[in-house]
Image: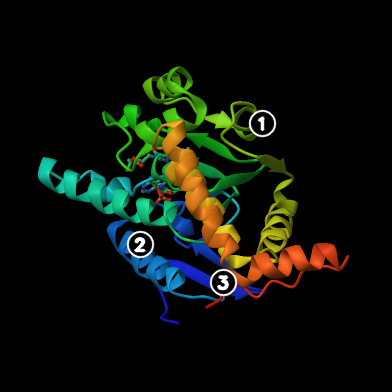
Amino acid sequence: MPTYKHLLFEEQNQIATITFNRPKALNALNQELLQELAGLLDVIAGNEDWRVLVLTGAGEKAFVAGADITELATLNALQGKYFAKLGQDVINRLQHLPIPVIAAVNGYALGGGSEMALACDFIYAADSAMFGLPEINLGLIPGFGGTQRLARLIGRNRAKELIFTGRMVKADEARDIGLVNKVCPADALMDEVLKTAALMAQKGKVSLRAAKQAINKGLDVDLATGCEIERDAFALCMASDDAKEGTTAFLEKRPAEFKGRLNE
Ligand code: CAA
């Protein structure tokens, strides 16, 4: 594995973990970090062994406190557009990663940090976590997909209120509005995330990927087209050894042992 200046990478029991690692700047996203993340996500996308990816932040204070404002402050309009494109491209890559991604939000997830978490498949948060899109306070708007993904996840009007005011929400409120799946005591967060990741890692690789793709692609189209996407994904699963093993194991009253290969 290559080494990274601003990211830590670990892998255990088929679960990969990326830790944003600029704790002195509350893990703010500078261009170098975003470029490193793009490269690492490509490595993960091409690896057959890792079943689930977890994202978290170094230190106790922040997941990611946003795009790096010291860099932002120096950009002109054209450079700002490039910066937003860089962030959006990386975050799109994260959303479309074939394996499930869990955000373990252990503190501030602001601006680009919330936008990163929004592109994950779901979010678990420490009870100390704070979410927000405070760009309005900088005379800006979210530039890494926040205006789009937040409205899609929690609804147009709630998203507008949060983006227009820049108000931060605590973990409990984030759960109540559907942004966060689960809130845990801070010291139990990683255990809870890894427990859920391990549960998913035992499932069939083909069906896990197919479920993720069907849900993601289906959300961008009408219901009939979404059901067509689901049928194709279902057929792909039927062609896998995993489906043969899963159905046979059920009928033989034994636990399934998924190997995750397509049959010939
Ligand atoms: N960029 C660069 N540095 C940052 C940062 C950021 N987004 N957030 C925090 N830091 C730095 C601080 O400048 C400070 O550095 P120094 O010690 O060198 O002074 C260090 O991290 C610790 O931060 P604070 O002293 O401010 O800590 P605090 O506990 O008083 O406050 C905070 C914590 C409320 C998160 C506060 O740091 C804050 O408001 N940060 C900025 C949040 C923000 O506006 N994010 C949006 C960025 S723009 C964006 O993301 C655009 C986009 O959509 C792409």
- The residue at 52%/43% (across/down) is 108
Label 1 – label 2 distance at C-alpha: 30 Å
**Secondary structure found at label 1:** helix
Mark 2 CB near ligand 1 (8 Å cut): no
Q: Which quadrant of the render holds ligand 1?
A: top left
The answer to which of marks 3 and 1 sits earlier in the sequence is: 3
For mark 3, what is the residue?
50
**235 shown above or below 263:** above
Mark 1 CB near ligand 1 (8 Å cut): no
- Tags 3 and 1 touching, CB below 8 Å: no
- The residue at 26%/28% (across/down) is 139
* Quadrant of the image occupied by residue 35: bottom left
For mark 2, what is the residue?
33
- Report x, y in % for residue 166: 41, 26
Q: Left or right? Give the position of 129 relative to 25.
A: right
**260 shown above or below 142:** below
